Amino acid sequence: MNRLDGKIAFLSGAARGIGAETARLMVEAGGRVAIGDVLDERGRETVRGLEAAGGEALYVHLDVTRADDWAAAIAVVTARFGGLDILVNNAGVFIAKGIEESTAADWERLCGVNLTAVFLGTRAALPALRERGATSAQGSAIVNLSSIVGLVGSARAPLYSLTKGGVTLFTKSTALECARKGYRIRANSIHPGIIDTEMGAQAIAARGESDIAAARAQAGAAHPIGRLGTAADVAKGILFLASDDAGFMTGSSLVLDGGWTAQ
């Protein structure tokens, strides 16, 4: 089991799905967890569940596209828990439209949540991560949620692919900048295949099949392992990258795709 004893983590977009499952595993591993989202009641419900399981958890309202929200959220977390060891930039949106069908508003929405938010969150969290990393055995950690289409192209969601490709390279650049400056902060990205979550359901619907059950079966079969991924599959990977077990990993891409990109 990866241990996070004494670690403090902040996860964006974690009211549900992969983020909520990651928060649960982090609490089980001994971490203290804060989650930020715009889904306030869902987020508070998630935190209540974490606390009922004996964990220390906090919910803060966070619009990831707003710098002021990020500054306020990090301030609340560090005041409550005394610092920050782990940032998980998990928030994301999915729009499946071709290039010709996409609007400027579609791009602005995707860019705001999938790209700008990662920059804003990283910038806001760096001072706190740097402070804790200076005295941590393996330093602090940033984990950015990218996608398999941040590594290969997407025929159905080219603009989404563009944003996730940006996350991939920003992660590598963050790792290099932190190393150059002597910050003991590791930065890695994670690349899920199609995951059985609400966003995954959107990706499956984008295949254009009228029979959703058939579309799910096709999407599962497209992964050589023969099934869709689960939130737990991805959460375990995030937990690893956030833990000291990944102490020699920075600027890396962890692919959790059931073999999709091996084809």
Image (cartoon, grey):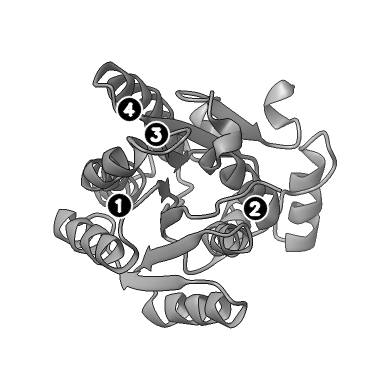
The amino acid type, in three-letter code, at marker 2 is Ile
How far from the left and from the top, in percent, is residue 187?
A: 42, 32
How far is the residue under mark 4 from the one under mark 1? Answer: 23 Å
What residue is at 65 percent from the left and 46 percent from the top? 2
Locate residue 201 relative to residue 41 in the image: left or right: right
Sequence-wise first label, 4 or 1: 1
How far from the left and from the top, in percent, is residue 33?
A: 46, 63
How far is the residue under mark 2 from the one under mark 4? Answer: 32 Å
- As drawn, the label of residue 174 is 4
Most foreground residue, 94 or 36: 36
Locate residue 186 relative to residue 69 in the image: left or right: right
Residue under circle 3?
A: 167
Look at the numbered discs 3 and 2 and tell me whether their residues touch, using CB distance below 8 Å: no
Other-residue count near label 3 (Cα within 10 Å), few / some / many at <14 / 14–19 / ≥20? many
How far is the residue under mark 3 from the one under mark 2? Answer: 22 Å
SS under mark 4: helix
Sequence-wise first label, 2 or 4: 4
Q: Nearer the viewer, mark 4 or mark 3?
A: 4
Sequence-wise first label, 4 or 3: 3
The amino acid type, in three-letter code, at marker 4 is Thr
Residue under circle 2?
A: 204
How far is the residue under mark 2 from the one under mark 1? Answer: 20 Å
The amino acid type, in three-letter code, at marker 3 is Val
Q: Nearer the viewer, mark 3 or mark 2?
A: 3
How far from the left and from the top, in percent, is residue 6?
A: 48, 55
Most foreground residue, 66 or 226: 66
How far is the residue under mark 3 from the one under mark 1? Answer: 15 Å
What residue is at 45 percent from the left and 51 percent from the top? 90
How far from the left and from the top, in percent, is residue 133?
A: 36, 38
Other-residue count near label 4 (Cα within 10 Å), few / some / many at <14 / 14–19 / ≥20? many
- As drawn, the label of residue 109 is 1
